[in-house]
Amino acid sequence: ANAVAVGDQLAFTSLWFAGDQALPSLTAIVELSDPSGQAIFRESRLPAGPDYPTEQWAPGTYVRYPFSLTLPPWAVEAA
């Protein structure tokens, strides 16, 4: 496990598969946990950003989307 400090930017890429049918509007939840498993940060986002909602994904499509977030001070204080 890697340590994360306040103000650190976390960047990662998500990969989604649309499946074989049209999708409804979906939301991705990004959650960070402390070593005990307690959630200290949680944020909901559109899986591929506001310009490409899941209703527009064609069946069988793979969608890659970069995420980044900055750990806010209150998240560490809550831990």
Image (tube, rainbow, N blue to C red):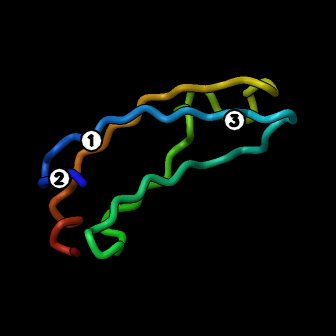
Q: Mark 2 is on which residue type? A: Val
To which residue does mark 3 refer?
A: 54
The first of marks 3 and 1 along the sequence is 1
Q: CB under 8 Å between callouts 3 and 2?
A: no
Q: Where is residue 5, by image quadrant?
A: bottom left
The residue positioned 87% from the left and 35% from the top of the image is 21
Farthest residue, direction front: 1
To which residue does mark 2 refer?
A: 4
Q: Mark 1 is on which residue type? A: Leu
Q: Is residue 37 left or right of residue 44?
A: left
Q: Is residue 7 left or right of residue 69?
A: left
- Residue 6 position, x and y percent, is 13, 54
Q: Where is residue 15, by image quadrant?
A: top right
Depth order, front residue of 64/50: 64
Q: Secondary structure at mark 2?
A: loop
Q: Mark 3 is on which residue type? A: Thr
Count numbered badges in the picture. Answer: 3
The first of marks 3 and 2 along the sequence is 2
In three-dimensional space, the C-alpha distance between marks 3 and 2, rounded to whole angstroms, equals: 30 Å
Q: Where is residue 76, by image quadrant?
A: bottom left
**Mark 3 or 1, closer to the camera:** 1
Q: Is residue 22 left or right of residue 4?
A: right
Q: Secondary structure at mark 3?
A: helix
